[in-house]
Amino acid sequence: MKKIKIFACLGLILAASIFIAADHIDAPGVAGSSADIADFYAFEPTTGSDNTVFIVNVQSNVLPDLTYGEFDEDVLIEINIDLDGDLVEDQVIQAIPRDGIMYFFGPFSPSSTGLNSEVATGNALGSVEISSTTAITTTTDNGVSLFAGPRQDAFYFDFIRFNEVIAPSPSDNSGFNVPGTDTFDGANTLSIALEVPNELLGTPTAQNVIGVPVYKTWVTTNRKQ
């Protein structure tokens, strides 16, 4: 794989190591492609684990057979990790597809920070086949588990009821139904997932509100120039 100069086209909110965020179909310039970030999750697989799980969902509303919705080979997904709380990435994990394979690079300390990135081919982490039918997972020699492919959209939201409640002249604005109807039921999203030993990420010095060291992390998608 050649090094590719790219630029960031979309970012998502940063947060601590136990984090869930959703932002479906937000930017018209990236909607309908794998540059559109839908969800980002970062968490411990079990309490007190020495690993961290990162899940990035892009391009929601993907059909199960991938008749539309495939990872764009010109889009790099980049997980940024801040160790010291200055809101600048200290470690980066990259994922980019080629010919049905998702290639992962990192974690590594980037030579430059901000919007511009370059695929770090010298920091290969591993690869996994992108599959629409089975959950294929690769585990590397250093204990990193990798996945890439369509999954059931985890975002539960009654979008129809939401529009009824916020309408300019709602007939009933009493609130949401319980449990409501999941508008996204049956829709998929394109996902990458990694479980990474913390020793590969580095030791965080940033702390949360109760003084516990945490990783602050955010995800960007970057399109080839």
Image (cartoon, helix red, strand yellow):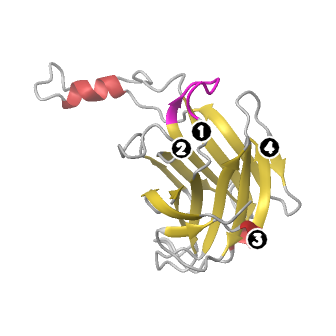
Residue 157 can be seen in this image = yes
Residue 191: percent from left, percent from top: 62, 42
Q: What residue type is labelled 3?
A: Gly
- In this view, the residue farthest toward the left is 169
Distance from disc 4 to disc 2, alpha carbons, whole Å, reads: 20 Å
- In this view, the residue farthest toward the right is 141
Q: Inspect the magenta stretch and tell me whether residue 64 lies in it.
A: yes
Mark 1 neighbour class, 10 Å CA radius: few under 14, some 14 to 19, many 20 or more: many
Task: Establish if 215 lies above or below 175.
Answer: below
Residue sitting at x 77%, y 30%: 134
Q: Tell me where residue 190 sits by quadrant.
A: top right
The residue singled out by tag 1 in the image is: 190
In what element is the residue under mark 3? helix
Using the image as rendered, state which of residue 137 and residue 182 is in the foreground.
137
> In this rendering, would 40 be left or right of 136?
left
Q: In which quarter of the image is the N terminus?
A: bottom right
Cβ–Cβ below 8 Å for labels 3 and 4? no
